[in-house]
């Protein structure tokens, strides 16, 4: 695994945040512009976007809230 410098992580985070602010249909064009030929940067961001799509906001949403929502659905 390649070590990511703080500067590189900030660059990835900036592009990732910009991509997440856009609709999926707009992301490809945004990434092309934001990464400007830096294929490694684009790959890192695309990997994080794919993970976010699969995992959603699990880090930001407490697990007990998810469990409570599941239980409420069972009671209905």
Image: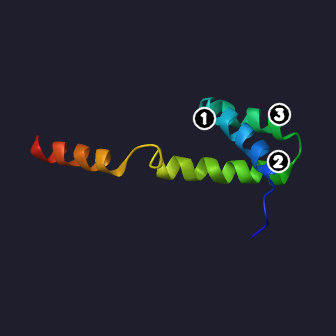
Which quadrant is home to the N terminus?
bottom right
Q: Position of residue 51 (x, y in %)?
A: 57, 53
Residue at x 89%, y 44% (from the top left corner): 37
In the picture as drawn, the residue positioned furthest to the left comes out as 75
The local secondary structure at tag 1 comes to: helix
Binning the other alpha carbons within 10 Å of mark 3 as few (below 14), some (14 to 19) or many (20 upward) gives few
Label 2 secondary element: helix
Residue on which the image places disc 1: 24
Residue pointed to by mark 2: 7
Picture mark count: 3
Crowd band around label 2 with a 10 angstrom C-alpha radius: few (<14), some (14–19), many (20+): few
State left or right for residue 38 relative to residue 18.
Answer: right
Question: Which residue is located at x 62 percent, y 29 percent?
Answer: 21
Question: Residue 17 location in percent, x, y?
Answer: 66, 36
Callout in the foreground (2, 1): 2
Q: Is residue 45 left or right of residue 32?
A: left
Judged left or right of residue 28, residue 64 is: left
**Label 3 vs 2, first from the N-terminus:** 2
Write down the residue under mark 3.
Answer: 33
Frontmost residue, 29 versus 69: 69
């Amino acid at each position: 695994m390649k070590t990511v410098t703080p500067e590189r992580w900030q660059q990835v985070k900036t592009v990732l945040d910009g991509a997440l602010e856009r609709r999926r249909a707009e992301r490809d064009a945004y990434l092309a512009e934001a990464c400007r030929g830096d294929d490694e940067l684009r790959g890192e961001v695309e990997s994080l976007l794919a993970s976010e799509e699969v995992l959603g906001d699990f880090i930001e949403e407490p697990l007990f809230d998810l469990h409570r929502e599941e239980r409420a659905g069972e009671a209905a």
